[in-house]
């Protein structure tokens, strides 16, 4: 869908000023803002709006951002304006902080330098598209068919090929997976059940409710509190990488039998933020498999399947690539030693599933070719600009902790 065409281009300064207003207020308050230039463009949009969400002014912004070419620029613009999935109601300070993480700079440096550049590029796309007849500003390409929500990949380890399943949907839709792993903070304090993170979703799905939807038992929350009390950790932080075990609550009706809560998020004092370190993810996932080995034989049939999210690939500040690079060594170690686990991953976006599919499709190197294997790992870290841009664009808060 093209932006409306005008006989003259809107003034860049006027457009930039209005885009900055939107950044401060967020898209949830667009109706309260005086943005006459954006509103004039929005009035000439086709009614169907190209299938994009939001009102007319929001569609103008989304179309402009979609033309930024992906990578850090587009990702930072989406977070800055509240256009990224799950961020439209975030306070401006949280959106700015997340955009700063995309560039790996402090919030203050981002505010002074990067933010003006990012918003200026959004304004530039609006001006350029509104003032030229060709080419039109097209909406993001849509698929001509529904993409598969479950992908089974054949993954080659050192001596064998094993199936790995990637689920592309919310974690509460999982069926017949014995153990589902949930990221947690080091206090094992679950977020409110109405939030969108993996841990909040599992808390909500594990609660028992009456026929009218009223809460009868907050099963996962209560059992996690009992675990911390039993281990002397109530009200204090545990060591990152610690794993607490609870039942699946109401999820047992879907064939989920256990929840493993992995403490990877370390809260920052006097703030709403936290840090996630890759080493803590690796240690936590290794502990998951150790506990799975201890518990498996106590059940009939034994526990065998386990599903992992991408830890910290959201507000934790890690990209999906960084998160996967931290957890995969622990998974691969289990597969290489011959463990017969059925491995699953759950993500919310097909872009992230595409990334996992590319990473897991790479063949394992024989023992004698360690130098070449190391070189491949370094290549992954220094991914080609286009590939790296796609990795960073896949960062989602859909994969929020």
Image: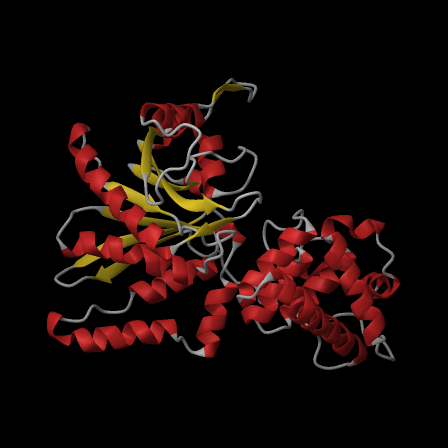
Task: Name the residue located 54 percent from the left edge and 48 percent from the top edge.
Answer: 273
**Looking at the image, which is closer to me, 45 or 169?**
169
Reply above or below: 258 against 116.
above
| The one of 117 and 352 positioned closer to us in this rendering | 117
Residue 127 x, y percent position in the rendering = 78, 75
On the image, the x and y values in percent for residue 366 come to 14, 71
Give residue 104's position: percent from left, percent from top.
53, 66
Q: Quadrant of residue 133?
A: bottom right
* Residue shown at the point (72%, 72%) measured from the top left: 120
Q: Quadrant of residue 3?
A: bottom right
Picture residue at 67% right of the left edge, 71% below the top: 113
Q: Nearer the viewer, residue 272 or 215?
A: 272
Percent of width and height locating residue 128 = 75, 78
Image side of residue 291 versus residue 55, left or right: left
Above-or-below relation of 15 to 324: below
Would residue 118 be found to the left or right of residue 177 on screen? Answer: right
- Residue 232 found in image quarter: top left
Front one among 50 and 176: 176
Height in image: 185 above or below 368? above
Up-down: is 105 above or below 246?
A: below
Residue 251 shown left or right of residue 398 in the figure: left
Q: Please indicate, yes or no, whether residue 45 appears anywhere in the rendered image.
A: no
For the image, the number of numbered tags is: 0
Q: Residue at x 71, y 68 (%)?
A: 119
**Is residue 233 visible to the viewer in this orientation of the structure?**
yes
Quarter of the image where the N terminus is located:
bottom right
């Amino acid at each position: 869908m093209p932006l409306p065409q005008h006989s003259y281009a809107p003034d860049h300064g006027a457009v930039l000023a209005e885009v900055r207003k939107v950044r401060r207020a967020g898209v949830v308050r667009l109706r309260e803002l005086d943005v006459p230039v954006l509103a004039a463009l929005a009035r000439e949009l086709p009614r169907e709006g190209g299938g994009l969400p939001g009102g007319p002014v929001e569609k103008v912004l989304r179309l402009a951002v979609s033309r930024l070419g992906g990578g850090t620029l587009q990702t930072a613009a989406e977070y800055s304006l509240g256009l990224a999935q799950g961020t439209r109601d975030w306070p401006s300070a949280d959106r700015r902080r997340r955009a700063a993480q995309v560039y790996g700079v402090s919030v203050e440096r981002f505010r002074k330098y990067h933010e003006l550049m990012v918003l200026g590029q959004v304004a530039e796309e609006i001006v350029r598209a509104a003032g030229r007849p060709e080419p039109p500003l097209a909406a993001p390409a849509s698929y001509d068919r529904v993409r598969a929500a479950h992908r089974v990949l054949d993954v080659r380890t050192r001596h064998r090929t094993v199936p790995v399943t990637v689920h592309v949907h919310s974690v509460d839709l999982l069926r017949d997976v014995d153990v589902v792993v949930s990221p947690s903070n080091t206090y094992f304090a679950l977020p409110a059940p109405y939030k969108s993170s993996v841990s909040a979703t599992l808390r909500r799905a594990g609660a028992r409710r009456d026929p009218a939807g009223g809460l009868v038992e907050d099963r996962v929350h209560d059992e996690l509190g009992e675990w911390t009390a039993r281990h002397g950790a109530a009200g204090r932080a545990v060591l990152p990488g610690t794993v607490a075990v609870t039942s699946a609550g109401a999820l047992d009706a879907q064939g989920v039998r256990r929840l493993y809560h992995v403490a990877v998020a370390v809260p920052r004092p006097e703030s709403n933020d936290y840090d996630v370190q890759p080493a803590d993810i690796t240690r936590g996932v290794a502990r998951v498999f150790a506990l799975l080995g201890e518990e498996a034989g106590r059940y009939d049939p034994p526990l065998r399947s386990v599903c992992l999210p991408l830890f910290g690939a959201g507000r934790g500040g890690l990209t999906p690539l960084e998160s996967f690079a931290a957890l995969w060594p622990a998974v691969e170690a289990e597969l290489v030693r011959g463990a017969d686990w059925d491995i699953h991953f759950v993500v919310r976006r097909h872009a992230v599933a595409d990334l996992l599919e590319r990473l897991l499709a790479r063949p394992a190197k024989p023992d004698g070719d360690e130098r070449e294997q190391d070189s491949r790992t370094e290549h992954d870290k220094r991914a080609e600009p286009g590939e790296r841009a796609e990795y960073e664009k896949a960062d989602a808060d859909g994969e929020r902790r």
